[in-house]
Image (spheres, coloured by chain):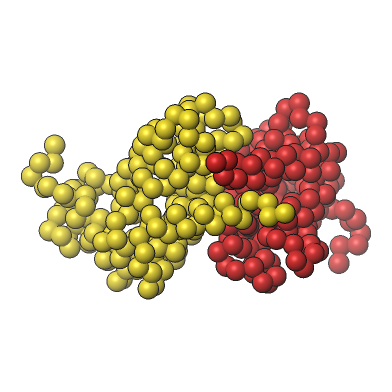
Chain colours: A yellow, B red
């Protein structure tokens, strides 16, 4: 359908992020984003309903990565082993070369309550989706809810660490550590 | 300041909930809420900035209950013991006679995305506050974040169970069980 503009969504996304960071999110229009990479406003709106959605483009692939991890875990794996697999798979969605992009995206989101709400909603939906996938594996409802929320706790804390200034470890390595800390925290020491 | 109207906020809150549930949140005005208990619109706005806030009245007392639990835990209690204490204290905020009220409130919130966002924001702020109180106890930042999020996971799942149709156990009892399930889930079984 848009064969004559290969990679248009990705180019628009990259341009949008650069403009949001340089000029501010409110001050940037869809037309300006499109023009900055030699595309038209019409092309912009063929790919995105509004400029906010540029920041959330491709997020279904993150959901798919989590789900692939849940589905591929061995059938007899206990819930937190399944969660560990899902986190590992999700980390492949954020290779180290994407770190600067993720940092910029997060700083734009952090400055705008409407974007924060959209992001929170995205993460809440992701939590429900993971819980649903655990249910399908035969995990009971309560355990599925606890495990899915624990997965998101580890993911969000690890992601925030991954984009911190000076952090050089991979997201997978950070997740491993944070998951270990969560397990240690919840293991009775007496 | 409003000595001549003892309990006005509570009366307005009760009336608002009854009207929201009976007629719908959108269809109910602040004036109607006030009039239904023989008060004026002016009195309503002396207590609440808008009708949405009626649903969140007194929530600082829930925050205070959580914090009291964190502060009163023995100085050497490990983080999840502190969390258990905070959850126990928070449960006193929801005695069984409040269950019908909480059920109605939640059903109104569940029907309106704007109220869900306000509620999510409230819970996110509460999580940050608990993490801050743990930091003050000398808990490191990462552990404080993990423990605070685990506390909210247990609280939210327990609260949802407490208001389910037919549930008769106290919130404290449900929290105990859910916390135990979280600990069991996160304890390596191998």
Q: Is residue B172 visible?
A: yes
Asked if B170 appears above or below A13 in the picture, the reply is: above
Please tell me in which quadrant of the rendered image residue A24 appears: bottom left
Nearer to me, A16 or B33: A16
Report whether B76 appears left or right of A32.
right
Q: Is residue B61 left or right of residue A108?
A: right
Residue A153 on image: x %, y %: 52, 52
User: Quick one: quadrant of the C terminus of chain A?
Assistant: bottom right
- Residue placed most toward the observer, B190 or A3: B190
Report the number of discs. 0
Is B132 placed above or below A76 here? below
The residue that appears at 44% across and 29% down in the rendered structure is A75
Please, which residue is most extreme toward the left here? Answer: A4
Q: Is residue A84 left or right of residue A92?
A: right
Quick one: quadrant of the N terminus of chain A?
A: top left
Picture residue at 86% right of the left edge, 62% below the top: B2
Tell me residue B75's x, y (percent): 77, 68
Q: Is residue A25 visible?
A: no
Q: Residue at x 26, y 66 (%)?
A: A18
Residue in the image at 38% along x and 54% along y: A172
At which x and y percent is residue A106? 39, 62
Q: Nearer the viewer, residue A129 or A158?
A: A158
Q: Is residue B68 left or right of residue B105?
A: right
Residue B142 lies, in percent from the top left, at 55, 64
Q: Residue furthest front?
A: B190
Q: Nearer the viewer, residue B123 or B180?
A: B180
């Amino acid at each position: 359908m848009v064969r004559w503009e290969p990679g248009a969504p990705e180019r628009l996304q990259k341009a949008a992020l650069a403009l949001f960071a340089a000029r501010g999110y409110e001050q940037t229009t869809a037309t300006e984003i499109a023009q900055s990479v030699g595309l038209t406003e019409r092309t912009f709106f063929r790919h995105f309903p509004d400029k906010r959605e540029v920041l959330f483009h491709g997020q279904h692939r993150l959901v798919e990565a989590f789900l692939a991890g849940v589905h591929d875990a061995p059938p007899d794996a206990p819930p937190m082993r399944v969660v560990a697999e899902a986190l590992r798979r999700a980390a492949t969605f954020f290779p180290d070369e994407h770190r600067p992009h993720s940092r910029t995206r997060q700083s734009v989101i952090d400055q705008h309550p409407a974007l924060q709400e959209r992001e929170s909603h995205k993460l809440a939906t992701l939590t429900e989706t993971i819980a649903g996938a655990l249910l399908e594996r035969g995990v009971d409802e309560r355990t599925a809810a606890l495990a899915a929320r624990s997965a998101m706790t580890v993911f969000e804390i690890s992601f925030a660490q991954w984009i911190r200034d000076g952090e050089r470890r991979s997201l997978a390595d950070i997740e491993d550590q944070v998951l270990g800390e969560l397990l240690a925290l919840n293991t009775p020491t007496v």
